[in-house]
Image (tube, rainbow, N blue to C red):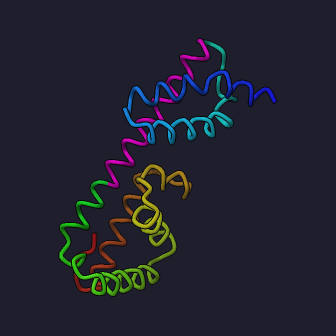
Amino acid sequence: MAFGQLLEMHYDFIHAVAWKWTRSRPDADDIAQDVCIRLASAIAGFRGEGRFRTWLYSLVLNAVRDLARKSTRDRRKTEEWSLDPSTQDGEAQEDDMQEIWTAVQTLSPKQRDAVMLVYSEGLDHAEAADVLGCSESTVSWHLHEARKRLKIILGREVA
């Protein structure tokens, strides 16, 4: 009940800040929803040392930055795919992807998990590290080793 009232009191503020930073209603809607979800667990971290709105503002800005990073990653992936000649032929692309994912299944579990989280789920190295319970550099190392192994298995470079 109290949490719902807190959301009602601050939702317009959350949405307005998100809109000011993104200038996109759909993005502001997504960010506001994400912040409301994050707020449920993050509220325990509010120490009351400053104003609640100031703390909430930083939560919204972090969500804006997260969305911007995700958008940049998605845009890069789209650009990479559009430049990849294999994407011009859907059937060839599907066969190529199947070959790659079959090869991924032969990797060690840690390498396979890192590859799946980063390349299939779209997580960055830090997010994958959180999921796997290791450091970001360990994820990077697993991906490096996976690329080397896949190059041997497939006889060519892989993204």
Say which quarter of the image contains residue 23.
top left
| Segment colored magenta | 51-74
**Front one among 20 and 36:** 20
Where is residue 77 drawn, in percent x and y? Answer: 30, 60
Where is residue 124 drawn, in percent x and y? Answer: 41, 53
Residue ID at (68%, 36%): 40
Where is residue 83 drawn, in percent x and y? Answer: 18, 67
In-image side of 49 versus 152 (left or right): right
Q: Residue furthest right?
A: 1
Residue ID at (44%, 70%): 111
Magenta-drawn stretch contains 143: no
In-image side of 119 versus 58 (left or right): left
Q: Residue furthest front?
A: 25
Q: Residue furthest top?
A: 50
**Front one among 113 and 135:** 113
**Front one among 108 and 31:** 31
